[in-house]
Image: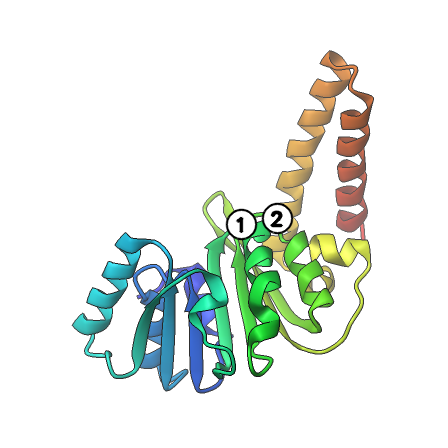
Amino acid sequence: MLDARLDAVLGYVDGEVLLDVGSDHAYLPIEAIRQGKVSSAICGEVVEGPFKSTIRNIAAEGMTAQIEARFGSGLQVVAEGEKVDTVTICGMGGPLIAEILKERLHRLANKPRLVLQANIHTYPIRKVLAESGYRIIDETVIQDGHHFYEIIVAEAGEVEYDEQSLTFGPVLLEKREAAFIEKLQRELSHQEKILKNLLENSNDAAKINEVSLKVEQLKEVLLK
């Protein structure tokens, strides 16, 4: 059973072969096979403990013929020219996901669908996608208690995004889901507190300007 975050990611998996980067116990690939979302999967893991757990879980589910665990960093677990249909990268910060994509995305044989779930800072992900010939086809925000997780789905296609779209998400800005609005409202409250504290206790003009800009950007989106 997947949590709401990974269950939402699973809904975007498509094609025959899934590559799950940072698989962490293989929960997502196992469920993808179980539900018939894909016919085979590759689990990439760079940490020894989770890698061993991945192998054990695959064996326990009787899926060793369908799911292969590979030890390695990021997209390096896929050989040049090897075909995968969907790549999932979940549970990491946006900058790390962006780094993984930038380093090796161009080496993948075909242009697979990308399903990316970031815990924080999604701006660099969208920037790398646009620079790599990918367009964002869907986005959503999953709320789990006090935590918000953004999911970005991208496929091959040339597109240019303005700064607001890179920051907040072109699809999220259109859909304006309740969780997305709640996330922005909380962020606005947080940034306003920071700004108030800076104005009362700091002479750092650059920092004050930086936070003031964030507050104005958030207000602009929320007032649309």
Q: Is residue 46 left or right of residue 84?
A: left
**Residue at position x 69%, y 69% in the image:** 132
Residue at the spot of label 2: 121
Please tell me which residue lies in front, 35 or 109: 109
Decide: few, some or many residues near mark 2? Use Cα within 10 Å; few <14, some 14-19, many ≥20: some
x and y percentages locating residue 180 in the rendered image: 63, 54
**Nearer to the camera, 211 or 50:** 50
- Measuring 75% from the left and 48% from the top, which residue is drawn there? 222
* Secondary element at tag 1: loop
Q: Number of callouts in the render?
A: 2
Residue drawn 54% across the image and 69% down it: 115
Q: Which residue type carries mark 2?
A: His
**Quarter holding residue 62:** bottom left
**Left or right: 169 in relation to 182:** right
Instruction: Name the quadrant containing residue 153.
Output: bottom right
The residue to which callout 1 is attached is 93
Q: Secondary structure at mark 2?
A: loop
Nearer to us in this view, 195 or 221: 195
**Residue 5: x percent and y percent?**
45, 60
List x then y, in percent, for residue 7.
Answer: 42, 67
The answer to which of marks 1 and 2 sits earlier in the sequence is 1
From the viewer's side, name the closer residue of 80 and 196.
80
Whole-number angstrom distance, CA of label 1 to CA of label 2? 6 Å
Question: As shown in the figure, which amino acid type bears the numbered disc 1?
Answer: Gly
Outermost residue toward the front? 80
